Amino acid sequence: STASSSSVVYASIPVSSVTGLTATVVDSTSVQLNWTAMTSPADGYSSITLYTVEYKLSSDTTWNTAGTNTSNAYLVSGLTTLSTYYFRVKASNIYGQGPSTDGTVSATLFGVPSAPGQPTLTQTAGSTSIVATWTAPSSSNGASVTQYSIALLKKDGTTYATLDNKCSEYTTLLSGTTCTVLMTDIISTAVYTVSDAGTYIKVKVEAKNIYGFGSYSITNVDSIRVQNAPTQ
C-alpha cells in the first residue's frame, strides 16, 4: 500500500494588514475611507468579522477610534476644518485583531472661503446702472472660489434678496468680482416705492468653494441712493 498525506491549515488572527486604504475628503468635516476587503490567506483563513477605523491629528501621538464596520468602507465625520488627519484600519476575525495599516494615509480638511472685501458702489453720471465691486476673500481655505453671490437689503431694512441674476455679469459671477445692475432692477428687487427715493442702496457679498458659501462681507459704505422709484 502507499501512504497518503494531507496538509492542515490552522486558522489564526489576520496575519497581515489591510491593503488599498484611501482617504477622500467629502466636506469640511468628513473623510470617506475605503480599502480592499481582506481574503485568505491574509485573513488568517478565517473570515473577517469587523474592521476598526482609527484616526489622529497630524500633531497627535495617540490614535482615536472612529468606529467599526463589517464592510470595507467607513465615513469619518465630526473632524475639524483646516486640519490634517491620519488614518489606519485593523481587521478582526473570530480569533482576534490583526495588525494595523501603517498610518501614513492622510487627508487635509479644507473649509469655506472667508468673507470677500467690503463692496463699493459706483454710478457713472447719467447712467441707469449701478456697479458693485469687491475684492476676493483673504483666504479660500484650501479650495478655489467658484462663485460669488450678491445680496440687496430690501425695503424692510432687515431681509436681503439676491441680485445674482440681475447682474449683467451673471454668467461670470462664478469668478468675477463685479456686478452691474440696473436701477430699475434694484427698485423692483428691494420692493421700493416712490416714497423710498433717496434711500441708500446696501449690498453684501459672499463667496463659495466646493465646501459651500462662507460668511457675507460687511455692507457697502453709503454712497448711492435709490432714484426714480415707481409710484405705488
Image (cartoon, rainbow, N blue to C red):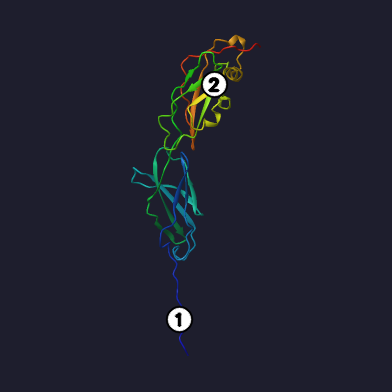
How far apart in space, not on screen, are marks 2 and 1 (Cα)? 86 Å
Pinpoint residue 76: horizontal percent, then vertical percent. Answer: 47, 45
Q: Give the numbered dot on residue 5.
A: 1
Residue 61 position within the rendered picture, expressed as x and y whole percent measured from the top left: 33, 46
Residue 125's place in the image compared with 82, above or below, is above
Which residue is labeled 2 in the image?
A: 152
Give the image location of residue 218, x and y in percent: 46, 21
Q: Quadrant of residue 118?
A: top left
The numbered mark, 2 or 1, whose residue comes first in the sequence reads 1
Quadrant in which residue 19 is drawn: bottom left
Residue ID at (60%, 9%): 195
Q: Quadrant of residue 58?
A: top left
- Number of numbered callouts drawn: 2
Q: Three-letter amino acid code at disc 2?
A: Leu
Task: Please report the residue visible at 38 percent of the width from the left and 47 percent of the height from the top.
Answer: 63
Foreground: disc 2 or disc 1 = 2
Taking the view exactly as shown, the residue that stands out farthest to the front is: 126
Q: Amino acid at mark 1?
A: Ser
For the residue labelled by badge 1, is the local secondary structure a helix, a strand or a loop?
loop
